[in-house]
Image (cartoon, rainbow, N blue to C red):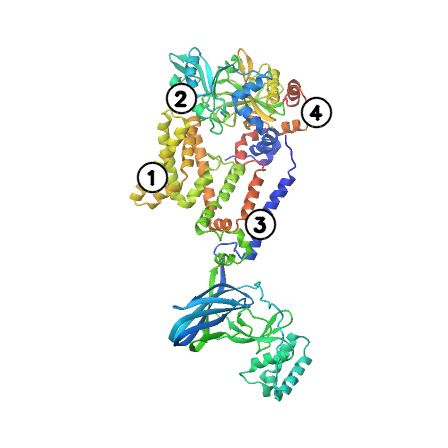
Amino acid sequence: MTVRSRIPFYVAVFLLITAGISFATWRHIELGIPWMTGEQRPVWMIEARVDFEGQGDPAQVNLHIPQQPPGFRILTEQAASPGYGFSILESSGSRRAEWTKREVTGPQTLYFKAQFVPDETAPEQRPARPPRPQAVFWEEPQATAVRELLSQATERSSSPESMTRELILLMQPDNRTQNTTLLVSDENYLRLLVRMLNHAGIAARTADALKLEDARRRQQLVPFLQIYNGKRWLTFDPRTAEQGVPENLLLWRQGSESLLDVLGGDNSQVSFSMLRQTVPALQLATLEASSNGLSVLSFYQLPIEEQSMFRMLLLLPIGALMVAFMRIVIGVRTSGTFMPVLIAVAFVQTTLVPGLIAFLSVVAIGLLLRGYLSSLNLLLVSRISALIILVIFITAGLSIVGYQMGFNTGMTVTFFPMVIIAWTIERMSILWEEEGPREVLAQGTGSLFVAICAYLAMSTPLAGHLTFNFPELHLVILGLILLMGQYTGYKLSELRRFTPMKAYD
Amino acid sequence: MDWISPRSLTRLGMLNMNRRNVDYIARYNERSSYPLVDNKLKTKLAVSEYGVTTPKLLQVVRQQHEISHFREMAEDLSGFAIKPAKGSGGKGITVIIGRDGDDFVKASGARISVAMLERHLTNILAGLYSLAGTPDVAIVENLVQSSPALAKYSFQGVPDIRIIVFQGYPVMAMLRLATKASDGKANLHQGAVGVGLDIGTGKGLNAVQFNRPITLHPDTGLTLENIHIEAWEDMLEMAARCYEATGLGYMGVDLVVDAQEGPLLLELNARPGLAIQMANGCGLLPRLKNIEALKRPHFSPRERAQYAMEAFSRR
């Protein structure tokens, strides 16, 4: 006589389901785990190639590599350089790849490869403390020209950004006045710009960028201008005064550090080639998982063996949901509540048709042998134990015969849970004796039907993908099963069973 | 395929499996009372204090070695029934109605040797028929001699009366008659005939076999509507009394009418089936709701039986 309000129950189920879905959505957004299988994401593979001439001395090659280029995330990094010691040095906000070798002669080629994922939400690199404009000293007559230009630009602008834009425009060839021509030459244009901006009290520096185009080789870095506006570094194209980093632009170097240092080598140069790749979104998420706090709640960190075990285990709730649905809503009769799920799990490993044949033959042979056992007048426990051993014999026999006949699928019988099969045989046999073969057939086909349905649900790639990558979705399954536990409506089978009641309606 | 719409089932007030489990069994039956009804031996002892009579207990076989005593005890018995205490749905019940030399004669007429009976007892002790496969005890009871008035309707076997008792009120009843198809057993899903009984009078309403309406018994050819149960009010009262004995709010009470001893309780069932509704041609839900809506329940079994006869009579 416990009549409790069901509202807390429904609230709890609602919370479970929303928690499951929202957590999954959150992880989908944060970690980029795809909803569907086989989703692809673009990735830029960029290869920096360093060439130099060895002089027979120890060589140390030092290449600046990007840390947090705006709009991208670094996925993988690797160096290919036989015979060289390699390490990545990180110090005070800059990262450098360093190759070392004791004796180097002749032309040398070193490769550094990195994969970049376009990501608008990638965190920006912020300077630890605001940079100060450097003091710049000018000689006459440049000093006057600079002052003149700067005052022009200041007049037309209101902020460091607009000031920079105006200054760049003023220094373009078609806008040049006498003052500018005096200052600008092709080689020193950018350096001049940086110095002038610093002189005007705006912290400025150069940056080197790569224009990303698919399958380009031997690309050089393109210089860009960066100014600090008090909050962050802003990037300008020094040729067009365009502000911001376009999507296809990867800032390889920011700041004043050198790009390449070679000790013990001559004629060093660096060039870049790039390739646009697509990577399964899932692989991407897995690779990135290690760098994200959320990944604690996923299985990617586990050893591969445990991962594959969990892949299987996490399918079970789908089978359980299927059994609950079939029994509660449809009203299929099964022999043993969760026997169908275990059979379905075995089917997942054996695939359907060979599994079905193997299962049916084991049960059929088992039933025949059980007929003999029942005449032996054995105690229940020893009869079941004997049956388990017989089932093992049968499976072994089927495997060997199958193998000798050239069916490797015969071997898959071993995936079936022996004890469950033994009990199934025992129950079926008793059912046969008590209720007749009709009932055996009804429950047997019911169990197999549910097992096949559960197998079909569990073997879809999407089910495996969602259950493993979004384990929190099991909360939703749990909620659904709890809801079904409160289903008091008619089963589908009852609509048929109660048909004779039509006469009284 | 023939289907009935859920709407007309609702209109008929048909109780379904899920609702029975969630709204009645889970709500009104205390888990702790289950062992009382799942174990026939415990049931016997519990109800005897409340004046409910059961078939006479001849022997309880608890241990394997006690089986040898069975042989001695059965030596001079002509009729008895062996039952697993924790059996369900009539499983494992063997009814012996006579002897043929050293062999025993089952209700179906088949011969069975003492050795086979002992094997049967062994199986019962090992828990073959018990609900969870747990070790069990076997009880040997006096054979019920069905009263001739009812026995003539049944093909072999003893006709039994199933009464659904809800919170102590008998709400629906049916008579179960064994048939050839059911192998002398009174289980509806094995092919026994279910005859709905009017709670008000104890008279037959309509009958079903294999869920299909029938008017004549398939084996005896007797018209089932003429059935009338004697001492109906006493039987209802007896069923109602089981509520006090067990505390189960929703249960099935199985009674038989013995020629000598009158109504006897065979067993109680904490999860009574739904087929009784088909035998009665009406749903349980309106009656259950009627009882649930009672503001002042009656305290004595007799009053409850009388209320039920008043409220649920077909007239």
The subunit carrying tag 4 is B
Nearer the observer, A198 or B83:
A198
Q: Which residue is denoted by mark 3 in the rendering?
A: A21
Q: Is residue A171 visible?
A: yes
Q: Which residue is denoted by mark 1 in the rendering?
A: A396
Q: What element carries label 3?
A: helix
Q: Report, in whole angstroms, how far the alpha carbon at label 1 lies from the one at label 2.
A: 32 Å
Density class for disc 3 (Cα within 10 Å; few <14, some 14-19, many ≥20) is some
- Residue A376 place in picture, x, y as percent: 36, 25
Q: Which amino acid does label 4 sit on?
A: Arg
Q: Report, in whole angstroms, how far the alpha carbon at label 1 lies from the one at label 3.
A: 45 Å
Density class for disc 1 (Cα within 10 Å; few <14, some 14-19, many ≥20) is some
Q: Is residue A177 visible?
A: no
Q: Which residue is denoted by mark 4 in the rendering?
A: B296
Q: Is mark 4 on a helix, strand or loop?
A: loop
- B132 to B63, vertically: above or below: below
The subunit carrying tag 1 is A
Have a look at marks 3 and 2 and say if they share a chain: no
Q: Do the residues labelled 2 and 4 touch (CB within 8 Å)?
A: no
Have a look at marks 4 and 3 and say if they share a chain: no
Mark nearer the viewer, 1 or 4: 1
Q: Which residue is denoted by mark 2 in the rendering?
A: B119
Density class for disc 4 (Cα within 10 Å; few <14, some 14-19, many ≥20) is few
Have a look at marks 1 and 4 and say if they share a chain: no
Mark nearer the viewer, 2 or 4: 2
> Residue placed at 52% from the left, 55% from the top?
A33
Indicate left or right for A487 with A398 as reference: right
